[in-house]
Structures are given as C-alpha cells and as structure tokens.
Image: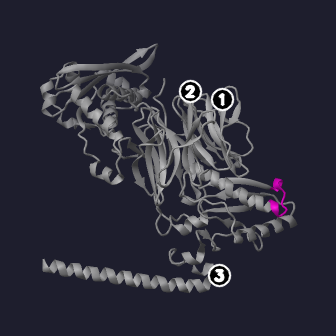
Amino acid sequence: MNLGKIFKNAFLVIIFGLIVTACATKKSVTTKTDTSTTTKATETKKADPIEKLDALMQGDVYIGSDTVGELASGVPDRVFFATNETILTTASRETLRKQAAWLRQNSDVTVVVEGHADERGTREYNLALGERRANAAKDYLMTYGVSSDRIKVLSYGKERPVDSGSNPLSWSKNRRSVTVKAN
Amino acid sequence: MRNKILLIFTFCFFLKPGISYSLVEIDITRGNLDPLPISVSPFFADETSKEKIKKNLDIDNLGLEISKVIENNLRKTGLFDTLDRESFLQKPDIAHLKPRFEDWALIKSQVLITGKVNSKIINDKDYINIEFKLWDVLGAKFVDGLSLTTTPRSWRRVGHKISDKIYELLTGESGYFDTRIIYVAEEGPKTQRVKKLALMDQDGFNTKYITLGKELVLTPRFNPADDKIITYMSYFRNNPRVYIVNLQTGERKVVGDFRGMTFAPRFSPDGQKLIMSLAKDGNSEIWVRNLETNIQEKLTDHPSIDTSPSYSPDGKYITFNSDRSGYQQIYVMRSDGSNVKRISFGSGIYGTPVWSPRGDLIAFTKLHKRKFYIGVMRTDGTGERLLTENFYQEAPSWSPNGRIIIFYRETKTDDKGEGFSAKLWSIDLTGYNERLVLTETDASDPSWSSLLRN
C-alpha cells in the first residue's frame, strides 16, 4: 500500500518534470526560429513540425518556401490559402503579380491553374473548393493583364496533396493553387 | 418461437433508432444484443451431382461452400449466432428430409437451415438446382423454403438469395445480400494515389476492376433502377467530367455538354435523371439532366458551393450541402429547385447528405472539433444521431433495405507522413455492429446497389 503510494508520487514527479522540460525546450526553439525565419525558412525544414508552426504559418496560411517551385526563374509557382478560404493574402497577391508580369512578357505561354484542398473536408465539397481557389488566382492574373484564354482552371480537390502528413502544417501546404505551364 | 424472434427484431430495429444517444453510450451498450442461435447444416449433393459440379467448377463440396456463404452473411448482421457445424449431430441429407428437432435443440439452436444441391442438364447445358428449407426447432416444424436453378458459375448468388429469404423470414425486413458494391480501389503513396473503379459482391467476393488506373476516377454510384448502370467522375484527358457506364456492354459516355467541371453525380430513383454539380468561374451549382430527353436545367442559384445532391426515394425532393451560411450545412429543396430549406443546425459542419431508401432519414458526414462522424437525422433535421466517430470518415451509402450504412475511413499518418490507409466500413443504423468491409486493395467512395435483378 505504502509502496504503491511512493511509486505513484514518484511517477507524478517524473511526469511533472517531463512536462516542464518539454515546455522549456519548445519555447527556446520557437524563439530561435522566430529570428531566423525572416532570412530563410527552409533552414528549419528538419525541425519538429509543431515547433516551427509560428515561423511557417500566419494564421493557418502557409508562408514557408518548402514545396514551392518556380513558374520561371524568380517567379514562385504557388500561393496558399486559409482553411475553407479562397481569399488571397498580401504575399499571394505579390506572387501572382510576379506570375502575371512574367506571363505578359512571355505571351506565347499558356497555363493551367490547379486548385487544391487539404484532406479535412468531404471529397465533393473539396472539388468545388479547389475550383474556387484556382479561379481566385485566375481572376487576379486577369486583373494584371493576362487574358482568360491563356489560363485553364483544373481542380483536384484533395486528390493530390504535396505533403502526406496529418497535421496543421502539412494541411497548410496542401491548401494551394499552383500555376503550371501548359505548353 | 416466431414471436420471440420478432420481439428481438422489434427491439433493435424500431426502438433503438428513436433513442438519441451520445457516442460514449454506444461504446457501453454496443454488443449487448442477444443474437439468435441458428444452425446452417451443410447442403448435401449425391455422388453423381458432386462429380458433375467438380468437373464444372473444381469445387469438391459445393453444398458446404454454399452453406458457408449463408453462414457468413447471417453472422455479419450481428443478429444471428451461427453455430459451429462440428457440433451438429444429424447428417445433412437426413436433416433435410426430416430433422430430429431434439438433436438441434440440444445444441441450443432455435432455427435450422438445410439444403440440397442437384446437377441438372437443360438443353444440353449444365445447371445446378439448389433447394433449401427453414425449420423452427422449438416449434418443431417446417417454416418455408425455396428452390432455385442457375448456371454453376452463379452459385454464390444462390447463397445470397437464400440468405435474403432467411433474413426476410426471420426479421420481416427485405434482405440486402444479393447486392454489389461499387467503389474506388486505391493504391500507391498518399501524394500520388492511383485510383480504379472496382465492383464486388456485397461480401467482398468476385472483385472486378472497371478502369485501369490511368486517369483519376471518383465517386461511382449505382443507378438504383438498373444495377448494370453506374455513374462516376473521371479526369479522362484532364477534363474532370461526369460519365455513365453500362457495366454489361462497357459503353461509356460523358454526361451533358458543360463548360466547366461536372462532379458529384447521382441518379434519380427511377434512373431517368441525373443530378450533379457544375463548377464554373469559381461557383458550383446543382444541375439535373433528363437522360431521356437530354434536357438539362440548373436547380440552385447562389454564389456559394452547392454540391453532393441526393434524391428522396419518391423523387420529389433533393437534399444537398451548401456553404451559403458560411459553412457547409445540409439543405432540402423540391426537385424543381424551389423551397430551399436548411435542415442541419447542430454544432459543426455537415456534408454528403444521402436520403435513406425508406425515405424517413438522411445520412450525413459531420465534422466537429476535429473529429468526423457518420450520423443520421430525420428529413426535417430533427432527431440527429451520431453512429460513429473517427479521425476521418465520410461518404455514407445505404443498404437497399435502409438498415446498414457503408462509408470509408482514412487513417492519420505518422510523423513521417507514413501509414496512410483508406478502408470501407459498415455500421448498422442502430449504431451497433461496426465492421471492416474487406477489399483487395485500399478503398473509398462506396455505393451499394439495389437488390440485383436477373
């Protein structure tokens, strides 16, 4: 009986200790990444996903550069969205303006804007959501002088994730529209 | 005895659905049903029939195999306790002629199934005739039976037809065993899944692949009026469109001439119309196309996402999900698009409404606090009951008798993004009897056929 109590107390102490150290380590890592992200976020690529959330997501929109490819040199190919949203963030609009500028200079190029959703929604709704996201990007490109007949829209819903993780960071990378050269 | 059986089924079929309970309570009460003890005596065949059948099918004891099909069907309902055939005292051939009821009562069997297989030649072709009888052990009497003749190759279907008859006799409900399930077979890594249409018997046998996996295919659904016809969505040539396929002829055609993506197709109960969504310029609306007149018509008119439509069994109403309130919720409208009413008001988001074949309930997927639920509600949105909770699950489809819901479930991946799987599951309307449905590969988007026609 007494022995059991001792064990129980010892166990609690150990657990408490673990929690304290866990909190402490997390905090220090977070502050470290905070200062480094402004220069380059990819450096934290190998860190634990949860520890680098602050650095790689704003709200729940992905702001890192992992998975981001190029439509052309210096022109990122994709923009990211918040859960269930189709609103373009300031960063997304900047990316799309770069895409539009490049497309205006290369008037023979046609593109497909692919719309994607994360895995946390029903399949059919996500097909519609992907189409909505791709059209948000398309509309913005058109505003900046790319004619609509050069842009095809294709929704994949949640069928083609780039990140196979089941966590908020992975989901944020998957909520995207990607501009791909079609010719 | 009949009264006692009826009482059991009245209990689980009619009382339970009315009781609203939380998921914790399901866990406590799950499996407390007393299944009915039933013996399926192996069906017997005489030596000449056995030899003929072995030549045709390469099966040594077809009678035993048929009784296994029946046993398996009955056991999986959760309503029957199929007794071990090793404990049977009477030989199959004698039991079929005249059972010694004391022998069957001794092993606590309340119902006995016996049967006989005969090979037959009709117009120079081999056939098999299968006869079965259902006996009331406690009442010591013959209840009913059936005799079926078929080509040897269709022997499993005979097992299913007999199972349906037994289910009907003992529950007073129509069965669901002589049916098929069409689904999407999945393989490969999560980021590059290869998907094919697959068709199988309700019990997982006779799997056939309808497409080769070259293009992405999604959401196949049976025509409830013709089990040879299905609709699905395909990314053939990177043009996501709704198609209709005749499984018998292999003929495939794109539905309608739409600019934009068509998806989320479902047949009307009479099979003459198809409802689906059309996504164009960032907006998804529900359309109906009359497959006979080829006239198509837009039913919703709203800047929100309107999709996942499903007809009521009388064809007068359509339920669908829309995010016009800000989040995905379930709505019901008349089938001409008038009188749109929101019916889901619980906390969380609601999607994929599917009208039950009985007409009184709508099955749905619900997302609440990061968990996905399959549930049912009345068609006015009252009486919501959640049947099962998990990390991810969706796409309910009803058994033709409206007693079971099949759906798919996906697993959470680990820290390395590995360990993904998608499987079919089924659960009774009561919230009991949750079961993994075995498939050759990973699987999603199941659709249950009506009872097969010939």
Give how far across and how far down residue B185 sits, in percent. Answer: 52, 47
Say whether marks 1 and 2 touch (CB < 8 Å): no
What is the chain identity of the residue bearing mark 3? Answer: A
User: Of residues A102 and B146, which is closer to you in this image?
Assistant: A102
Q: What is the CA distance from the residue labelled 2 to the residue labelled 3?
A: 60 Å
What is the chain identity of the residue bearing mark 1? Answer: B
Quadrant that contains the N terminus of chain B: top left
Give how far across and how far down residue B353 sits, in percent. Answer: 52, 43
Would you name the residue on which mark 2 appears? B270
Would you name the residue on which mark 3 appears? A40
Give how far across and how far down residue A38 sits, in percent. Answer: 65, 83
Q: Earlier in the sequence, mark 1 or mark 2?
A: 2
Would you name the residue on which mark 1 appears? B291
Q: Which residues are magenta?
A: A142-150
Residue positioned most to the top? B123
Instruction: Look at the picture and state if B393 lies above or below A2.
Output: above
What is the chain identity of the residue bearing mark 2? Answer: B
Q: Residues within 10 Å of mark 3 (few under 14, many from 20)?
A: few
Quick check: do tags 3 and 1 share a chain? Answer: no
Instruction: Look at the picture and state if A148 lies above or below B105.
Output: below
**Disc 2 on helix, strand or loop?**
loop
Q: What amino acid is labelled 3 in the image?
A: Lys
Q: Is residue B6 magenta?
A: no
**Disc 1 on helix, strand or loop?**
loop
